[in-house]
Amino acid sequence: MTEETVVVNAQPTLMAQLRRFLLRVSLTLTLTALLVLLVQHQIRLVKHERILEHPVMAALDAAGVSIRATQLRATALVRHEQDVTMEELKRLAARIAAARTEHSDVELWSEVRPQYRVVYYRGHDEAGGTWTASARFLRPDELSTGRLEVALLRELVGRLDGMRSAMYQMEGQLQRAVGAPLREIELEASVEGRPVPRDTDVERLVDQLMHEMNVEAVTTHTRVDGVTARGYSPRLTTTPYEVSGARTNVAIRISRQGQGMWVEVGTPTL
């Protein structure tokens, strides 16, 4: 019997090689196109939706409202306590103040009341305006456990670029001053716009501001002297609170004063 040897050519045919090459080219082109679209999308977000700016500032700019003043506040619970001495309050407030400037240019004062005691340090803010560092002990009555809290307030003239990062820096300053994990940290911001013309369509202005901040479930109250509105925006990272069972993290107040309409926007409230 004759044995036949069958030799199988393991090399791919020219057509198979070409198909694989074309597949690799197609995948490369697809990935490149997706990368280009992603970059274009990010550029659009930065330029048009202004994701790097705080939504409140971006909304006021889009509505043509110039900014007169900016206020930022960071407050945190240190611990529950039966009593806290003025010496400890002063020490905590001084640690917060140390992160802002040297104490030689700082004002110091305190308040003592039956329900609370607080120590303040105040100095000039590098952004224009003032900052106030404080530590306070709150105790409604002798039967209640008190709260030791720390806070940092910045009251600035005009606009503050980078407001979002500034608020987180304030939170970090409180954290470092206390040197222990903080609880119930609250970050608040409010911006006051310069007066707009008295004949401004107030309801339309409120709608535009809310739209620019992607605010949902807007509740508006019209008064003789102006309008107040509240709602919830997923773009705002401040902790919301409840009003009539609805989440709220942005508030707008437009009030008639003198010859113009004063515009104020706050998160989570005013």
Image: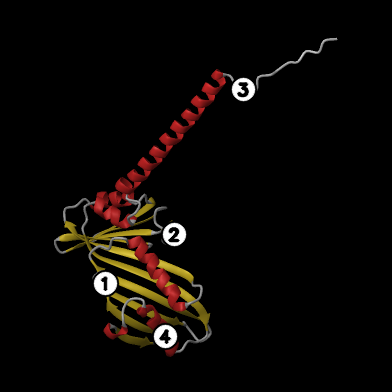
Q: Which amino acid does label 4 sit on?
A: Arg
Residue carrying label 1:
126
Q: Compare marks 2 and 4 and give the one earlier in the sequence.
A: 4
Q: How far apart are marks 2 and 4 (CA)?
A: 40 Å
Residue carrying label 2:
244
Q: Distance between the residues labelled 3 and 2?
A: 75 Å
How would you rate the neighbour count of disc 2 (Cα within 10 Å): few for under 14, some for 14-19, many for 20 or more? few
From the viewer's side, name the closer residue of 264 and 168: 168
Q: Residue at point 44% right, 62% down?
A: 239
Q: What residue type is labelled 2?
A: Ser
Residue carrying label 3:
11
Check the picture and name the quadrant holding the C terminus: bottom left
Q: Which mark is residue 91?
A: 4
Q: Where is residue 27 in the image (x, y as percent from the top left)?
A: 48, 31
Q: Compare marks 3 and 2 and give the one earlier in the sequence.
A: 3
Q: Compare marks 4 and 3 and give the one earlier in the sequence.
A: 3
Q: Residue furthest top?
A: 1
Q: Which amino acid does label 3 sit on?
A: Gln
Q: Which amino acid does label 1 sit on?
A: Glu
Q: Compare marks 1 and 4 and give the one earlier in the sequence.
A: 4
Q: Distance between the residues labelled 1 and 4?
A: 23 Å
Judge left or right: residue 79 versus residue 98: right
How would you rate the neighbour count of disc 3 (Cα within 10 Å): few for under 14, some for 14-19, many for 20 or more? few
Q: Which mark is residue 144?
A: none
- Depth check, mark 1 against mark 3: the one in front is 3
Label 2 element class: loop
Q: Residue at point 51% right, 26% down?
A: 21
Q: Where is residue 93 in the image (x, y as percent from the top left)?
A: 39, 82
Q: Compare marks 1 and 3 and give the one earlier in the sequence.
A: 3
Label 1 element class: loop
Residue 270 visible to the viewer:
no
